[in-house]
Image: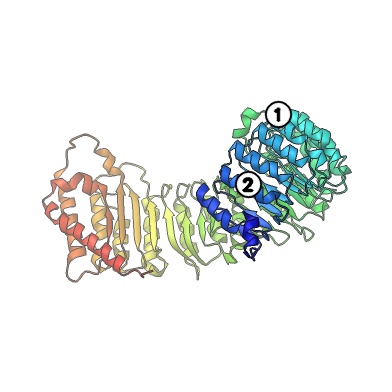
Amino acid sequence: MTEEKEEKGDAPNSNHLVDASHMNMFSKSTKSFMLKNLVFGVVLLDLSSNHIDEDCSKLLAEHLCSNKCTIRSLSVEYCHLTHKCSTIIFSAIGNSPLYEFYADNNILSNENCLALAHSLSKNPPLELLSVVGCQISSDSFIQLFTGLPKSKKLKHLRFDSNSMLDPSAIALADILPSLHLESLGVSDNEIWRDGTTAIIQACLRCDTLFSLDIGYNIVDFFELGLYVQKSEKLRFLGISGSKIYEEQLNNFLTIIGQSKITTLLLEGINFHHMPISWGKATENAFSNQSHIAHLIKCFDSNSYLKDVRLGFFELEQLLTLYEARKPSWNFTLSFHNFGKTRNTWLIHFPDFKIESPCNKLFWNTRISPGAVSILNVILKNTSFNGKPIEIIDLHGTKLNDEGYCKFFAELLPKTYTELDLSNTDLRNNSIDSLIEFLKKPDSYIERLHMQRTKSSAAAFQVYFQFLNEYPEKCPKILSFRFESSKPREENSVLDYSGEIGQLLEKNPALVELRLGGQVTGKDANNIISKLKFNSNLRFLELHSDLFDRYKSADPELDEQLLAVFNDFVEMFHEAILSEDTKCILEEFSFPLLTELFLGSIPNISLWPSILRKLESNYNAHLDNQPKH
């Protein structure tokens, strides 16, 4: 097919690179694409994530075997290859000019591995072979290894994330000295200590190897340390997720400090040895002060280190690193589970400059008061796309009053897009600290969330008094919940509800207000009493815990309470429908009223017009949005 095209005068692909990765084509579309683009002159062909059927496989194999083929790099990752399709393609590798072949994340059988071994035994120019995540069994690996010794040009083998097990690991170790590898990846292969030790000892006889990834297996760090000490060429070492003896770690870190390793993958080290526990294993190695002290000594000793990859560090451990850093530390630490969020953050030493993958600092575990200082250092030193972090999410951290007082005292005064303090031990003193922060020039929070905290109504009254004095400090979005020490009377009213009403009259930037707690009907009346003067609020939610008192199928409703809610509806109707109103409210939620009392009050007749006005405000807001 390709020869016919050239004979007809079709010019070679001028780009030389054909990248169809992630086009997600089905087999017919893939074939059409190949017929159009598979021409002589192409040096890179990436068909990843497209369906390759038997016809496509034959077309590809025919092109690879042509003496005019110019492809040097071929990728068929995630291509849903059947065993027959894999065999067709693999059989062509031995007659191809490929330097690199990637077949990751296809399911490969014993037959496929035999076909690949047969191709390798022809000694093709192939330098890199990658079959990561192909569910290759131990027996299939043994078949594949039969072709490796004859493939004299192979330099890079990537066998990660398969099922090598000890038998095939030992078989690989037997042939390793006869190969001329520069890099070997066998991580995540369910290899136990006998298998990894065999590979490590065999690597001692591989003079050309500079990169080894043996992580996510059971590894003897004593044997690995001997190899690191004796190897003159090893520069890249991957041991992430290794299951090790704890007593071997410190000595191993000392050896790393004396080595010439430049890149070290050390994420997820733990001391679980049995596979049944691996799924529940979490990184625990550097929670021990002795281990982190040896890690720091390693950084002090090894001037070759440039890239060290870790998993999760507690804030206290990050503080230890920050305080121990020295001008000689000229490397980057990458934390692949920063804050237990599964995000990767980079910290550049010695300046402690931090790169974030997003515009948010989210710490997904408990924060102690003693760790707050490093939290603020992180905020000051972190950038996303060259700009400072603007969103802080501390929900669920259980930070207490002492911690919040330190946090707000040290927090850099500036505008923050969002601050989430929900589900923490935020108490009255914490609210005072927040107010003191907001009093500073340039301090502002656009979206503030304080749900499920320990703060009382009195604390929020102080907060709203502050906002009434400084309405320019009012957030655009505010959600909070107050806690009551005892059940409230349903006819009672809180002073802070009047403070909210006064604030709304001053028409601050507040667009969304959501509050919860034991909210009474009289509280609600105070809140909306001045709503007609507000031209910014669009969302109002009042979630009352008092609703839980009416759990029977036909609850008895107090006449005085009915009168309160009847007044509320009348006031609400006036607020959003009077001729002189400025109210633009478009979403309102108050289940205590709408699901319980509304059907039993005379002013229910006003409710349909209220709903129509809310909808009208919503539509008007949509009409005013910029057209894209």
SS category of the residue bearing label 2: loop
Side (left or right) of 626 relative to 204 = left
Vertical relation: 365 (above or below) 193:
below
Q: Residue at position x 74%, y 29% from top?
A: 166
Side (left or right) of 594 relative to 248 = left
Answer whether residue 597 is visible to the viewer in this image: yes
Q: Which callout, 2 or 1, points to the residue nearer the camera?
A: 1
Vertical relation: 406 (above or below) 148:
below
Task: Give the class, few, some or many, for how many residues have Cα within 10 Å of label 2's Cα (few <14, many ≥20).
Answer: some
Q: Residue at position x 57%, y 55% from top?
A: 35
Q: Which mark is residue 620?
A: none
Vertical relation: 157 (above or below) 444:
above
Q: Residue at position x 24%, y 38% from top?
A: 550
Percent x, y of residue 277: 62, 30
Mark sitting earlier along the chain (2/1): 1
Percent x, y of residue 290: 75, 41
For the residue marked with disc 2, what is the amino acid? Glu
- Residue in the foreground of this view, choosing between 596 and 3: 3
| Quadrant assignment, res 557 | top left
Vertical relation: 28 (above or below) 283:
below
Task: Give the class, few, some or many, for how many residues have Cα within 10 Å of label 1's Cα (few <14, many ≥20).
Answer: some
- Residue in the foreground of this view, choosing between 80 and 624: 80
- Residue in the foreground of this view, choosing between 115 and 516: 115
Answer whether residue 336 is visible to the viewer in this image: no
Percent x, y of residue 532: 23, 66
| Quadrant assignment, res 108 | top right
Return the residue at label 1: 139
Side (left or right) of 66 relative to 528 = right
The alpha-carbon separation of the residues under discs 2 and 1 comes to 42 Å
Return the residue at label 2: 314
For the residue marked with disc 1, what is the amino acid? Asp
